[in-house]
Image (cartoon, rainbow, N blue to C red):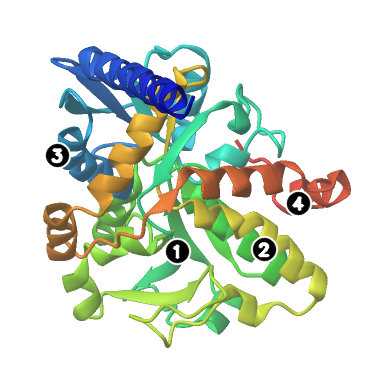
Amino acid sequence: MTGLLARTALAAATLAATLGAGRAQSVADFYRGKTVEVYVGYSTGGGYDIYARMLARHMGRFIPGNPTLLPKNMEGAGSLRLANWLANAAPRDGSAFGTIGRGTAFDPVLGQPGAQFVAADLSWIGSMNHEVSICASWQTSGVARFDDLLTKELLVGAVSNNDDTGQFAKVMNTVLGTRLKIVAGYPGGNDVVLAMERGEVHGACASYGQFRIYEQLIRDGKMIFLLRAEESPIPEIPDVPSIFDFAKTTEQRQLMRFIFSSTELGRPYVFPPDVPKERVEIMRKAFADALQDPSLLAEAAKMKMDMSYRPADHLERLVTQVYDTPPDLIEIVKKLVPNQQ
């Protein structure tokens, strides 16, 4: 009897291994020789684009079948156009995924016009970093610290009124009484910084990673950091104050925490809904492996790009928490940051 049980167990294990290999082989067969399209919801040259192109250079080595990853830009409405396309029109076989704005996932819950998706329906792959937003001014603006924003108008460039570049400024105006005037419509964060250099605008609120690639401008004192949308200090720039330092009431703090919770999504990547589960899992693993690869990390360090991997389940929890926010608080947020598109 013992021998029979042993043989049965061995047969079962062999069958399971065979089936597992078959499934893995089917994924490899699917991706072998394919081009996987990696969509970016912003224009070329900006932070999201730079991260995506770096990922595309490395991730294919970790996907069974070693497909080629091809970045494509689909800018529009602060990546809302891409989010809608991924949710409703993109192929659902695992041959296309994309990176959307970290705040875009919350557009539907806030009643953003034009949002035609539910973030929980997307298949989250992971995030390339824990993003922090910074507000900066140009040296000729006359604004060198937060208090100046209470008495002087500062023209700030933005992609849209409702992505990170516009939202940070709107929250500051509404909650803290600053005088930021938003000039929206730039294709991406890189275009906003160029507009600062040309004198079209005199400030910007964007990711710290976006600003870090302009190290020379910062070193020369042409770009001045005013404050950050993060309660914890940023080790590299510990003297830059937090927006929460200027909150006067508990309600102000609660509202800002809700609004800036999207910063934890960092640079998120998502599949469309209904992609076969085994392909989602393979891509999640390949994403994680790529972000721990020494060659990618060395390239990121050379370009002064922050890499701090966030797994899919972490992103899913954040999305669930925001979608579970009590309706009364959401209504306050809507009034606090009314849609301006």
Are there few (<14), some (14-19), or many (20+) residues within 10 Å of tag 2? some
Q: Which numbered disc, 2 or 3, marks the residue that appears first in the sequence?
A: 3
The residue wearing badge 2 is 257
Label at residue 132:
1
- Find out whether the residues at labels 2 and 1 contact each other: C-beta distance under 8 Å: no
**Cα–Cα gap, marks 1 and 3:** 24 Å
Q: Which numbered disc, 4 or 3, marks the residue that appears first in the sequence?
A: 3
Residue 57 shown left or right of residue 71 in the figure: left
Q: Which numbered disc, 2 or 1, marks the residue that appears first in the sequence?
A: 1
**Cα–Cα gap, marks 2 and 3:** 35 Å
Relative to 202, is 128 above or below? Answer: above
The residue wearing badge 3 is 57
**Cα–Cα gap, marks 4 and 1:** 20 Å
Residue at the front extreme, as displayed: 1
Q: What amino acid does circle 2 point to? A: Arg
The residue wearing badge 4 is 333
Quarter holding the C terminus is: top right
Decide which of 101, 220 is in the foreground and name it.
101
Quick check: can you spot residue 169? yes
Frontmost of labels 1 and 3 is 3
Element type where label 1 sits in the image: loop
